[in-house]
Amino acid sequence: MTRPTADMETKAILVLARRDHAEAMRVAAGLTIFGHRVDLVFMTGPVEESEANAAMAELLELSGIEPRTTVAEMAEELPWLDSAALAAAIVRSDAVLSI
């Protein structure tokens, strides 16, 4: 495994959780190991309540990632992004991963 060094550039990475919410949460949390600033946005539908997703949500919390959503049904639980806010988040990011 590559360890971060003083000369590694910290990146702003946006993870879009579109197809597999659990995998997106796992990837987002893993990216924080390298010191990157990671944002996660849930898309396409509410996150299913399952043991796997609960475990990944706990991992997000330990990683300091506060997810947001574009899903109206989740707006009471998480900060909601309209299309303009999502576009702004994409533009501010050095890299965008769609999972």
Image: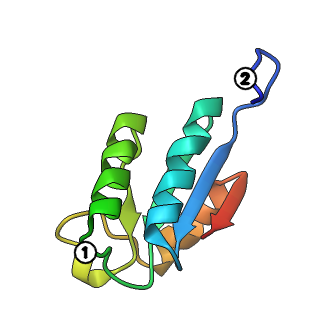
Residue furthest top in the image: 6
Residue furthest right in the image: 7
- Residue 67: give x, y in percent of width and height: 38, 56
Residue drawn 73% across the image and 23% down it:
3
Residue furthest front in the image: 51
Q: Residues within 10 Å of mark 1 (few under 14, many from 20)?
A: some
Q: Which residue is mark 1?
A: 74
Which image quadrant: the N terminus?
top right
Secondary structure found at label 1: helix
80 to the left or right of 15: left
83 to the left or right of 13: left
Which image quadrant: the C terminus?
bottom right
Residue drawn 76% across the image and 14% down it:
6
Q: Are marks 1 and 2 in contact (CB under 8 Å)?
A: no
Secondary structure found at label 2: loop
Q: Is residue 81 visible?
A: yes
Q: Is residue 37 visible?
A: no
Residue drawn 37% across the image and 62% down it:
68
Residue type for callout 2: Pro
Task: Tell me, for residue 91, which label it has, or none.
Answer: none
**Cα gap from disc 1 to disc 2, whole angstroms:** 35 Å
Q: Residues within 10 Å of mark 2 (few under 14, many from 20)?
A: few
Q: Which residue is mark 2?
A: 4
The image quadrant that residue 4 belongs to is top right
- Residue 93: give x, y in percent of width and height: 66, 54
Viewer-nearest residue: 10 or 47: 47
- Residue 78: give x, y in percent of width and height: 26, 63
Residue type for callout 1: Met
Viewer-nearest residue: 71 or 52: 52
Q: Is residue 58 above or below residue 97?
A: above
